[in-house]
Image: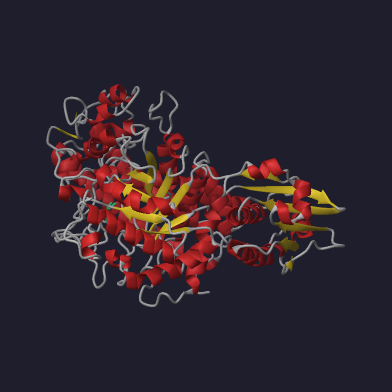
Amino acid sequence: TDYDDCWLQYDRVDDPDRLSAYRRRCLHAYVSEEGPELRAVRQELRVGLDGLLGREPHLWQHPPRSQDGFLAVGRRDNMEVVRHAVDAAEVDGLDEEGYVLRATEWEGQDCVVVTANTDRGMLFGTFHLLRLLSLGEPIADLDVVEEPRAKERVIDHWDNPFRGSVERGYAGQSIFDWETLPDLRERYWDYARLLASTGINGVVVNNVNTEKPDREGANDAIAGMEGWQLLESENLEKVAALATVFRRYGVRTFLSVNYAAPMLVGDLDTADPLEDDVEAWWKRKADELYERIPDFGGFLVKADSEGQRGPYDYDRDHAEGANVLGRALEPHDGRVFWRAFVYSEHEDRAVQAYETFEPLDGEFHDNVTLQIKNGPIDFQPREPVSTLFGAMPETNVACELQITQEYTGQGVHACSHLPQWEEVLEFDTHGDGEGTEVRDLLVDRAGEGFAGVANVGEDRNWTGHDLAQLNLYGFGRLAWDPTLGSEEVTREWAAQTFGRNPSVVETVTRIQEESWPAVIDYETGGIGLMHMMYNGEARLENHYDPGPEEWPEYTGIAEDGIGLDRTPSGSDYASQYQGPWPARYADPETCPEELLLFFHHLPWEHELDDGTTVIQRLYDNCFEGVEAVRALRERWSALAGTVDERRHRRVAERFDEQVVQAERWRDSLVSYFYEYAGVPDERGRVPLDD
Ligand code: BDP
């Protein structure tokens, strides 16, 4: 193919002992003949084992006799070797995505068994096994019983149909070609493989902005056919075609829908959720969808936000707004993902989502999931955790993360989001007393889990920056198991992507782990500021270049100091938290330094713990961020010769550009601070010489 395999490289195992152990157990594969996912299993084993073992595997439809050993993938009902290795109770206890991997001896042969209740489970199990082989793990004593912790693990494409652009996409045009669908591109199959290999089980194929918002400075204009039109009957066969691909890999297909669809797609003159006609229209549309796509996932909705229509247009609240869709999907087991990203003219945007949704806790239908961005503002390089987590015990919630690097260097800067996500997931909300971490709130029920805004496009490497493949991989893995650490996931990604050479894995892992802190430093000064980016006179919203002067309302910059007061003397956002957090955030002495200026407006010469002033810390962090990127570039460059030349060069070029761009950010921020503070840098770097 003319695009990369990402982490599915399946490089030949070089350790001879490992290789022969793997060959004995996996070169002969006995795979049962059931449902569609098992075809995917066979295909993946063929490709994966061929690569890893350096020989094409033999695929059997019955137990291969007179071999040293074999791999068996199938159900207990159909396979004696599986019954021998795994008790009925073990499989019965698994959910529909769980699986067992087990080494066993059977009739004198060394076997490995992959089994589950469903074909999907066996597919996820097969990917798990291939990952272990890719990582060079021993399998002689293999014994894994696993199921995903979070049920919903959905990737959200912000792809605009029919024009092929991707809102906040930095890897080329959309991979979905709506003009040629229902014809299928080979790339769709490989995309589905990539998703399933990480454990992702849902895909929303179109942008949440389904309609070109009618306002100046609107988001990426949608020319030609708009996203809401995918719901029109004549377009459903296109959606259905994509769904056949994803289904093969255990991934359900969802659509973003426009709240006014009964008017846009249908011919009603209202979309009021309490009108009978509207209720009936959504039901008919849902029935039609499920007739074409029996396992259709459901709807994603952005309502009353940034120009998209919503229940407020009819004086209805968001529970009333979401439930009408929930009722329509319910007979089909479909789900509504309803976004909490709602804000309007408000003194402090941070307080608004909570004020809108917390009072509605308990009013959402069971098959409605409230999809909450990790922070209260909008995917900024660092934010505190949204106060809605832990505040909606009677509501199914999903955490929305941004995989694409809208605010963290886009397709150019190296910035692993995994450490950021780990920080969010570990946060103790105190929602149900001490020890209620965000990740505990996403795994209780069906309908809870994760949504991630995709970073893929037509580029050869899928994600624009080779290192950004980690953000896609890591989203899936952390959604599957949010207790995994960032570093652990990064390490396994590095080994699968760049090979098992331990020093390469170590260096790549360190680079990824240290990339986010560097970006925070030069893009924000590292103590809680945000929105320092350029928006543009024509409001083109590039969000890539520095432009701190554009958003004084988000930084609270003034001659007397900087930061926003979100304590009781200000917007009081801090009081929306539970447990010790309101008090801790409200006092500059106890507020974590990395969030200080998010919660406080402080004098420029306010002293921090170590005696350094606020202004000096901002200067220092901006300079250190650039130094950190230079160091990352050096480390990458030292990998020359140990990772393949093509990818090495591509990433090296990006680092060169990142250094230049990081310097621009630093210079632009420090001069801006200096202009207001009038306090020179102790180390004489500001004002800048030129
Ligand atoms: C903002 C993006 C905008 C999205 C919006 C959203 O700049 O393009 O439409 O989020 O999440 O971060 O809906």
Instruction: Pinpoint residue 321: horizontal percent, then vertical percent.
Output: 25, 47
Q: Quadrant of residue 130?
A: bottom right
Whether 580 is drawn above or below 615: the answer is above
Q: Nearest the camera: 129 or 85?
A: 85
Residue drawn at (27%, 52%) of the image: 302
Whether 129 is drawn above or below 458: the answer is above
> Which colouring convention does the figure follow?
secondary structure
Residue drawn at (58%, 60%) of the image: 642
Instruction: Pinpoint residue 391: horizontal percent, then vertical percent.
Output: 33, 32
Q: Nearest the camera: 658 or 223?
A: 223
Instruction: Pinpoint residue 438: horizontal percent, then vertical percent.
Output: 41, 35
Q: Nearest the camera: 324 or 384?
A: 324
Q: Nearest the camera: 455 or 289?
A: 289
Instruction: Pinpoint residue 595: horizontal percent, then vertical percent.
Output: 30, 34
Whether 549 is drawn above or below 590: the answer is below
* Number of dots carrying numbers: 0
Res. 411 visible in picture:
no
> In the image, is 609 to the left or to the right of 276?
right
Res. 658 visible in picture:
yes
Residue drawn at (27%, 51%) of the image: 665
Residue drawn at (24%, 63%) of the image: 220
